[in-house]
Image (cartoon, rainbow, N blue to C red):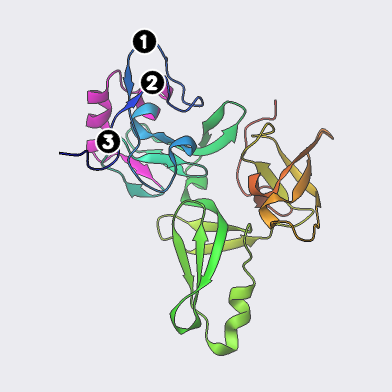
Amino acid sequence: MGKKGASTGLKRKPAPRSWPIHRKEFVWTVRPSPGPHSLDNCLPLAIILREILEFARTRKESKAIVSSGKVYVDGKIRWEDDFPVGLMDVLSITDVDKCFRILPSKKGLILHPINQEEAKFKLCRIENKTVVKNGHIQLNLHDGSNILIKTSESETSQGNVYKTFDTLKISLPEREILEHVKMKEGNFAIITGGKNIGNYGKIVEIEKAEGKKRRHTLVKIEDEKGNTYQTVLNFVFAIGEDKPLITLPEAS
């Protein structure tokens, strides 16, 4: 019989380079289950508990921790140790009273410690928007989730407020919109890809190019030290207007 479905195993050598694992110590590692983030843009819970936080020494121990119901991602209990955790996700472990936000850095994705108050919300970037039944607008977010904006004929302008690449501050676990940050010059943003990944600062210029896909337009960001970084809009994540809505690691 032919093979059915995708591979469930993953060897350490071809695993994403951003994962903090030893490449030659063992043959196999944990393949994340299909979920809200792609293989290259996530960390499985088992890798976080075993290699990063060192709460477990083996896969069996990491499974025991997760199956105890003490591990939350975005305010929901996760029961599988291969669940993929990605950009801006909030990880909470009740037994040790610790919370983390997944942020980009030069080494890939990192766990940034946050307090209990900040763990009550996350930031999501709008990747696309579509009109669905009854004229309602569905916002497609970067973490694979959707938010439905219910608008009547007299309130259609409400849905037009939200543009692609804007950021929403969303409560956890209710997933209600608390704040809306536009992708515009003067706002704070963090770079999520490319050679300048992890750098953050104010958006000083967004290229206005005719006949060019918007996600490929160039954006200039200046940090508090006066350093300027240039990247494409696809790698820019707005995080606040007057100041960042989230705490960030110290700039290197």
Q: Can you say whether 194 is above or below 124 in the image?
A: above
| Chain-order first, disc 2 or disc 1 | 2
Residue lying farthest to the bottom in this orientation: 154
Q: Between marks 2 and 1, how big is the CA–CA gap?
A: 9 Å
Q: Can you say whether 91 is above or below 47 in the image?
A: below
- In front of the other: label 3 or label 2? 2
Identify the magenta region. Answer: 48-73
Q: Between marks 3 and 2, how big is the CA–CA gap?
A: 22 Å
Q: What residue sits 46% from the left and 22% below the top?
A: 20
Q: Can you say whether 87 is above or below 12 in the image?
A: below
Q: Can you say whether 164 is above or below 19 in the image?
A: below
* Contact (Cβ within 8 Å) of mark 2 with mark 1: yes
Q: What residue sits 52% from the left and 46% below the top?
A: 118
> Is 29 included in the stretch rendered in magenta?
no
Secondary structure under the numbered disc 1 in the rendered image: loop
Please give the residue where the numbered disc 3 appears in the rendered image: 66
Secondary structure under the numbered disc 2 in the rendered image: loop
Identify which amino acid the numbered label 1 is placed on: Glu
Please give the residue where the numbered disc 2 appears in the rendered image: 12
Residue lying farthest to the top in this orientation: 25
Q: Quadrant of the N terminus?
A: top left
| Chain-order first, disc 3 or disc 2 | 2
Dot 2: few (<14), some (14–19), or many (≥20) neighbours within 10 Å?
many
Residue lying farthest to the left in this orientation: 1
Please give the residue where the numbered disc 1 appears in the rendered image: 25
User: In the picture provided, is 120 more to the left or to the right than 237?
Assistant: left
User: In the picture provided, is 31 more to the left or to the right than 210?
Assistant: left
